[in-house]
Structure formats: structure tokens, C-alpha cells
Image (cartoon, rainbow, N blue to C red):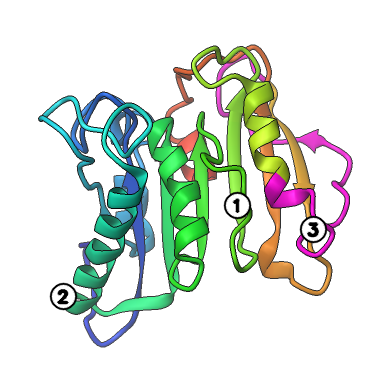
Amino acid sequence: VPPGYDPQVPAPLLLLLHGCPSDGAGPYGENVLKLGPVAEELGILFAVPDGMGAPGQRSWGGCSGSFDASSAYLRSLIEEARGLFNVDPARIFIAGYSDGGFMAYRMALDHGDLVAAIACLAGANPHGVKPSVPLPVLDVHGTADVNVPYADGLRSLEAFVGDSTWAMSPEDARRGPDLVTGAETAVTRWGTGCLPEGFFELWTLPGVNHFPSLIPDGATNTLA
């Protein structure tokens, strides 16, 4: 709960989903993205839940467990947070790394009525389908990723941006924020014309693998 939280004022809620095998306090989540301090600064309610499995070996479904069960669990967790705090229903966000990124996509597919936007680092769309409603998506992926190959990630997002009912053609790639030392981020953006809330951005990290060492502070604030 951020300092200065006022229960009379609706606050945004951000869930950060870890990679596997790990857990909420492990090395493949908050230790990579370090969104907690930014959430405090911006007045965002921040949750780092554990996936399924034994401590230190938890997953959302990509390594073990079930995406179906995890989807239901995370929705119940969000509803629990809404019962405890004054959560703004229009600003519920999910970010995930690796397996957590897969799960962020799955939440967008299953719960477009609840989730306002997602961000995925080194993950992909696990089922190759588009959400029932358009929503903002940020996908960050390194071209040297062998765990979740960049090409596979591109194919998995085609369902999100390849349908003219959901998105238009991509804009020209432009240079984006430097997230990793020595890697100039290239940003490609898809829009939806009459549905601006449904845009999609792909941030390509050239030569970066599945375990990026993000630049402190600057990268974290940019992602936030």
C-alpha cells in the first residue's frame, strides 16, 4: 500500500507476476523489474503474488501448474484486493516476466472486462488468440532470447495485431528508451483508430537474451 493512500480516493492496482521456477520474492520478478518503489512514488497499490507449486519452484502454467487455475486464482486475488482497498476498476494492470508474461497475456484473454492493460517482458501469448476486447499491451523482447525465442514471440502476438477488426498496420519502428546498456530499443506500435485504448507496442531489444540486466531506475521508470 503506497504512502499517503487515501481510502476515499480510488487507486490503481498493479500485479507483478514472476517467472519460473521462482516465487513472488524470488529472482525472476520484482528483483528484475523493481517496480515496487515506482508504485509507491506513483500511489499505486502493488501486489507480487506467488504462482502454484512448492516455494522457490512456483509457476503460472508455463513450467508446471495450470494457466486455467492460475487465471481463476488471480481474478479472485484482484477481487479480494477490491474488497480490502478502494481500487479504481478502470486502472487494474498486470505486468509479468517470462512465465509471468505468458500469464499476463492469459489474463488479458480471460478477463478483458477487468484488466485495463498488460506489460510482458520475455514472454508471449500462450494460446495464440486475441482478447474479447481491445486493450493496451506492451511487449518487451530480446532478439537473442533462446528460452522464449523472439520469432516465437512475434508469431504469438499476431493474433493480437493481425486482425483488422482489432488493429491497423504498424507504424514505422522508432528508437525507444534504453532499457539495457548498449542495446538501443526499437519501438513498433500498432493502433486501433477508433479504439485508441487498444494499442499495442513491441519494444525490441537487439542482442539481448532471456535474462536482461535492466538499467537501474531509468528502465524501471520507463516501464512504469
Amino acid type shown at disc 3: Ala
Which residue type does callout 2 highlight?
Leu
Mark 3 nearby-residue class (10 Å; few <14, some 14–19, many ≥20): many
Residue at position x 40%, y 77% from top?
A: 89
Front position among marks 3 and 1: 3
Q: Mark 1 points at which residue?
A: 137
- Secondary structure under badge 3? loop
Q: Distance between the residues labelled 2 and 3?
A: 36 Å
Residue picked out by circle 3: 167
Q: Is residue 138 magenta?
A: no
**Whether residue 4 is visible:** no
Q: Which of marks 1 and 2 is nearer the N terminus?
A: 2
* Residue 77 pos. (x, y %): 23, 62
| Residue depicted at x 71% and y 36% | 176
Q: Give the range drawn in magenta.
A: 159-183
> Residue at horizontal 45%, vertical 19%?
213
Find residue 113 and report its horizontal and vertical position in percent. Answer: 48, 73
Q: Is residue 170 magenta?
A: yes
Contact, CB < 8 Å: mark 1 with mark 2?
no
User: Residue 101 or 184: which is nearer the viewer?
Assistant: 101
